[in-house]
Amino acid sequence: MNPIDGAGGAGGGSYIDQLKALQEKQRAERGDTGEKVTGQTDLKQEDFLSLLTKQLANQDPFKPVDNEQMIAQMASFATVDGIGKMNDQFGSLNAAMTSSQALQASSLVGQDVLVPGNEGFKSAEGGIAGMVKLPQALNDVIVRIQNERGELLRSFSMGAKSPGDHRVEWDGKDDAGNPLPEGNYKVNVSGNIDGKSQDLELSTYANVNSVLLGNGDGNVMLNIAGYASPVKLTEVLEVGKSSSLGNVSKS
């Protein structure tokens, strides 16, 4: 049997280092090419204890095992094993929490939620509502409605507004008062800040169609009317805010 020094003799290093070196030596003697093989390839705590027991039975009497080093190595393996089990438990807990969140989020189906962005879905008879955040008081806040091709369909003023959040409502009609067809539209809100017209931060209300668990990353996702891709539940700013415009943003 190939010896492993009890106190880091000729081989030097800890038991783990010496065991790794011994493995590499044995692979070289067998002519291993490094190709993938079946079966166990990593040392586990049980393997270490088995090797350590055999090594103790065949140790060099002139180089006895260092008790402190042996205890330290055993403690290290115990710690790694404990961390591995803890990670498994956290994984199970995360999966359970994700399922619980998805169950709770299912109550959102059919409700309007406020999400960041200036795009919204207009139903046949409704419009689009949202919330704009003003960094300062503005003398005139302008709302512009565009279709998916970027064509300007409607423009109107909200008048002077104080700093903070303000509701934005579009009735779904163009400048001539004609109802526009169902579809996706962009709502741009701007104001004059420091002598320049700047777009302001806007969030829009949208209707939740369904709930899904995401891509295995623990995120609960919402399929929202008018959005090409799902929205994270954590991005929702407000839930169940009914609109004075009727069926706003519902599909």
Image (tube, rainbow, N blue to C red):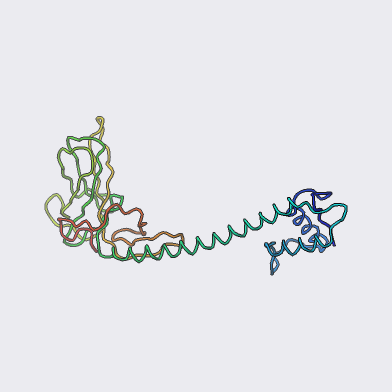
Q: Quadrant of residue 4?
A: bottom right
Apparent side of residue 137 relative to residue 71 in the rendered image (left or right): left
Front-most of residues 24 and 1: 1
Q: How many marks?
A: 0
Does residue 130 lie above or below 221 as drawn? above
User: Horizontal and vertical percent for residue 72?
Assistant: 69, 52
Q: Quadrant of residue 198?
A: top left
Q: Quadrant of the C terminus?
A: bottom left
Does residue 147 lie above or below 96 as drawn? above
User: Horizontal and vertical percent for residue 2?
Assistant: 84, 59
Front-most of residues 64 and 77: 64
Tell which residue pokes out farthest to the right in this image: 62
User: Horizontal and vertical percent for residue 152?
Assistant: 22, 48
Front-most of residues 68 and 161: 68
Tell which residue pokes out farthest to the bottom in this image: 38
User: Horizontal and vertical percent for residue 194?
Assistant: 26, 30
Tell which residue pokes out farthest to the front in this image: 67
Front-most of residues 182 and 2: 2
Apparent side of residue 111 relative to residue 176 in the rendered image (left or right): right
Q: Quadrant of the N terminus?
A: bottom right
Residue depicted at x 19% and y 37%: 162
Tell which residue pokes out farthest to the top in this image: 194
